[in-house]
Amino acid sequence: MGHRLSRIVTKTGDQGQTSLGSGVRVDKDSPPIEAMGTVDELNSWIGVLLMLAKSPAVKQSFELVQHDLFDLGAQISVPGTKLLSREHLERVEKSFESVNANLGMLKEFILPGGEPASAFAHVARTVCRRAERRLFSLCEIERQTEGQGTRDTSSQNYGLSYLNRLSDLLFVASRLENHFAGRPDVLWERGKSVSA
């Protein structure tokens, strides 16, 4: 493998611009950079989750997710690149079914907390939802710019569906981490803060 990152300090972004993988220069707060940055942030939180996770099922479920998110970033960075596929989506869906299989039905909303890995899975889940929103905004801009009648834009290519399923997987992963440690879900109690 060649030296793909031979220079880390380039000084080319000192004036608030950066280059997409396509070579196009854009502002650092532009929609594609916002989307890529949020996907990158999500990937970092998943790294924390993997480091703390005790459940083998959670570790196995997220083994390839970080690679998928890099692929999604590449799709955003170079419009027209198609790296995520139906197979990626199906793998996340199967992981969801596997992780959720041993969890009881929910009767109340869950609060983030319990085991550290559970709490960080919730952080990753909320960042995942933000990444989904940022990608949706980018797809809408591309659709309007290109005059397309559909939302299947070049940046999407299963990206929105993937992030949507991934946030669900993160939710059940948070539950499984508590379950694996013998801890109950942290449940929201209606009116508790008022009565206190």
Image (tube, rainbow, N blue to C red):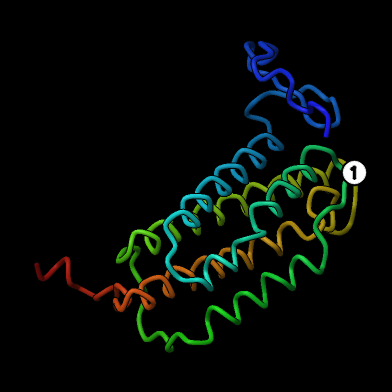
The answer to which image quadrant residue 73 occupies is top right
Left or right: 139 in relation to 69: right
Position in image of residue 117 (x %, y %): 40, 60
Indicate the quadrant containing the N terminus: top left, top right, bottom left or bottom right: top right
* Quadrant that contains the C terminus: bottom left
177 is higher (above) or lower (below) than 17: below
Nearest to the observer: residue 37 or residue 134 = 37
Q: What residue sits 70% from the left and 52% below the top?
A: 67
Residue drawn where x is 17% and y is 71% of the image: 192
Q: Is residue 76 visible?
A: yes
Count of labels in the image? 1
Secondary structure category for the residue under label 1: helix
Task: For label 1, count other residues whose C-alpha is less than 10 Å away and answer few (under 14), some (14-19) or many (20+).
Answer: few
123 to 114, vertically: above or below: above
Q: Is residue 136 visible?
A: no
| Residue drawn 44% across the image and 62% down it | 53
Position of residue 131 measured from the top left corner of the image (x, y, whole percent):
60, 50
- Residue 97 or residue 14, whichever sits in front: 97
The residue type indicated by label 1 comes to Glu
Residue at 82% x, 68% y: name it.
86
Q: Which residue is mark 1?
A: 146
